[in-house]
Amino acid sequence: CELGEKFAKLMIDEYPILSVAAACADSPSVFKGLSELRLKESNRLELIKTNLLRCGCHCEIKGDDLFINPVNKTEVNQLNIKTDFDHRIAMAFAVMGSKIGNLNIQDPDSIKTSFPNFVDEFNKAGGNIIE
């Protein structure tokens, strides 16, 4: 999957969950022109990379582009997901936890800023978040 820079400005808040989906795909993805991700509630671009690497998915940042290659998986090397109190990072990696197993989401209360019932709804849908 390749998404060009024109998409970045239209769906900037969707890139955390889209990156998690790309990490679970069967082929590489590149998302271009993500400079604005550095300016949100956190440096989302860096957090996405850091947390995908912790979850065993090869990814890298080149300039403002994010390259995700799920084919080059490694062992999960860190169960702690860094959020910098960013609600979208926390929610996206909660979804990743349902795929790869137990993850510790740091600062999970950040989710309440945008989706107070996330834990209940996610668990009803088959997730397994323990508070």
Image (spheres, rainbow, N blue to C red):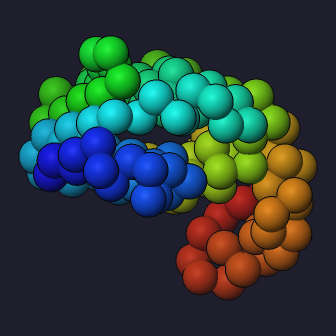
Residue at 34% over, 34% down:
33
Number of marks in the rendered image: 0
Say above or below: 105 vs 115.
Answer: above
**Position of residue 1 measured from the top left corner of the image (x, y, whole percent):** 15, 51
Left or right of 129, for residue 25: left
Asked which quadrant contains residue 5, the reply is top left
Q: Nearer the viewer, residue 88 or 13?
A: 13
Say above or below: 31 vs 91.
Answer: above
Say above or below: 87 vs 34.
Answer: below
Left or right of 36, for residue 7: left
Q: Does residue 15 appear in the picture of this structure?
A: yes
**Position of residue 65 measured from the top left corner of the image (x, y, whole percent):** 30, 28
Residue at 33% over, 54% down:
7
Q: Does residue 51 appear in the picture of this structure?
A: no
Say above or below: 116 vs 104.
Answer: below
Residue at 80% over, 55% down:
111
Location of the C terminus by quadrant is bottom right
Left or right of 67, for residue 111: right
Q: Nearer the viewer, residue 42 or 131?
A: 42
**Position of residue 55 measured from the top left corner of the image (x, y, whole percent):** 44, 32
Residue at 16% over, 47% down:
2
Q: Nearer the viewer, residue 110 or 77?
A: 110
Asked which quadrant contains residue 60, the reply is top left
**Position of residue 39 measured from the top left corner of the image (x, y, whole percent):** 64, 30
Furthest residue toward bottom? 124
